[in-house]
Amino acid sequence: MKVIICGAGQVGWQIARHLAGERNDVTVVDSNPDLVRRATDTLDVQGIAGFASYPDILDRAGARDADMIIAATHSDEVNMVTCQVAHSVFAIRRKIARLRAQSYLDAIYSDLYRRDHLPIDVVISPEREVAEAALKRLASPSSFDIHNFLDNKAVLLGISIDPDCPVVNTPLRQLTDLFSTLRAIVVGIRRDGALFVPSAKDQLFTGDDAYIFTHSDDVRRTLEIFGKHETQQHRIVVIGGGNVGLAVARTLEQRTERLRVRMIERDRKMAERAADALDRTIVLNGDGLDSALLDEAGIATADAVLTVTDDDKVNLLAAVRSKEMGCKMSICLVNDPTLVPLMGPLDVDAWINPRSTTVSSILRHVRHGRVRGVYSVGDAEAEVIEAQVLSTSPMAGRKIRDIAFPEGTMVCGLLKGDRMVKPVADTRIDDGDLIAIFAMADDVPEVERLLQVSIDFF
């Protein structure tokens, strides 16, 4: 497949890394020659320096025979015009654009993206993706990561292993014997900064981060077995009144249960905008690091604080100060993945990487075919791929034990009809099943070969 990626920033580079690693023909376009050079020096891609919306630049990038274009520059308008040029001049069949401005995303204007108007097949909103991720973290305060799969019948939980975890130092094979009715599997472990797929003889140690795939009905029991306890959240403080904070507060206001939400925003105009847009949320104008203002927001009795400003360091420090002042849980927005190792020592309970959430969303649409979902784990270290098994797949009609899965993969779960099945060695994978597979990044191409995935255009 030939793909043009417009924008060589964090998201564009990461998408290029994924697609180039899967032996696609990738060309990166960016107006910044240094970013293009970084991409071509570190990845197996071609690079063009220039404005992505210019027809001659797209022509040089090979648009005449491209299968897909991904417009992920920093400008919404450039991304929109790029898709229009790709459609009108080069007839590129699939066009994905990243748009940030909320006005472009309002449902009442969705007619704008019809093929005879502004032909964009898929619109990705990083702010909305991040807001949804934040709400998921709030819904499961004991997990640092959470994502739904298999028609919401299964959940991937990220859980930090504490010293009081009941199953610490227990071989994973014994967990099956001890909890025979539990529909949960440990599919990944991060230890000393390295992520790996465990074997049955591996154990969980204090300080590990475990990724656990479980039936949605068994989430509460799974958390209890791993030493976590869910609590109701009634008081929430949001630090940052930008698009992410505003989207979270709006959603919280729509919930049936009565929640007390308070927001802190440093910029006066943004604070006023948030106050006008929200009904029940109290908006305070000031510095989210100010102890007096945090005290006024009721941080000492808050069940959770969500720090979502556009400054990573402010988010980290605000989360730390909030916990120090008595807040029970902190969720932090962090763009720089090198800061993630600090979360444990700083006692930050959960974090959101906008790049990972956006990359996951784009990959879900890039791998269209029978792939139903792709979730990027960590700093794109691994993926959970959900796909429908085709009759042409090498795994169709065979038992898991008889399939040559790569070492860095694990079958997480199967959906047979409307029944979620916890996979074991003798489980047979049938044509039409929905399957979820945890795969380290290097093993994704082999997983796709086993799934016989291809790009479909609709």
Image (tube, rainbow, N blue to C red):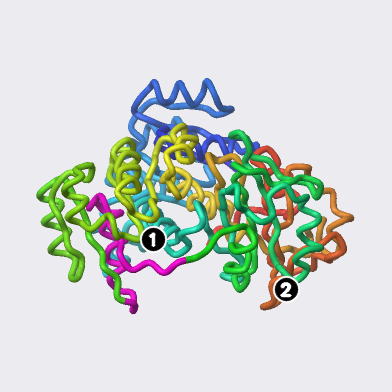
Q: Are marks 2 and 1 in contact (CB under 8 Å)?
A: no
Q: Is residue 392 toward the left or the right of residue 253 in the image? A: right
Label 1 SS? loop
Q: Is residue 232 shown in magenta?
A: yes
**Residue shown at 62% from the left, 51% from the top:** 211
What range is drawn magenta here? 231-257
Q: Quadrant of residue 23?
A: top right
Query: Which label is found at residue 39?
Result: none
Q: Is residue 359 visible?
A: yes
In this picture, residue 106 sits left or right of residue 387: left
For the residue pair 158 and 348, the one nearer the viewer reads as: 348
Q: Is residue 175 above or below residue 290?
A: below
Residue 115 marker = 1
Residue kind at label 2, given as amino acid type = Lys
In the displayed structure, 443 sits above or below 140; it is above
Q: Does the stretch in magenta take in 402?
A: no
Q: Position of residue 111 (x, y in %)?
A: 31, 67
Q: Which secondary structure lies at badge 2?
A: strand
Residue pictured at 51% horizontal, 50% vertical:
360
- Within-10-Å neighbours for mark 1: few <14, some 14–19, many 20+: few
Extreme-front residue of the structure: 164
Residue 119 appears in view: no
Give me the residue at 69% from left, 72% from top: 420
The mark total stands at: 2
Q: Nearer the viewer, residue 76 or 259?
A: 259
> 119 or 186, which is in the foreground?
186
Task: Please provide percent x and percent y for residue 6.
Answer: 41, 38
Q: Label 2 neighbourhood size at 10 Å, few (<14), some (14-19), many (20+)?
A: some
Q: x and y percent of residue 30 in the render?
A: 38, 30
Q: Which residue is mark 2?
A: 416
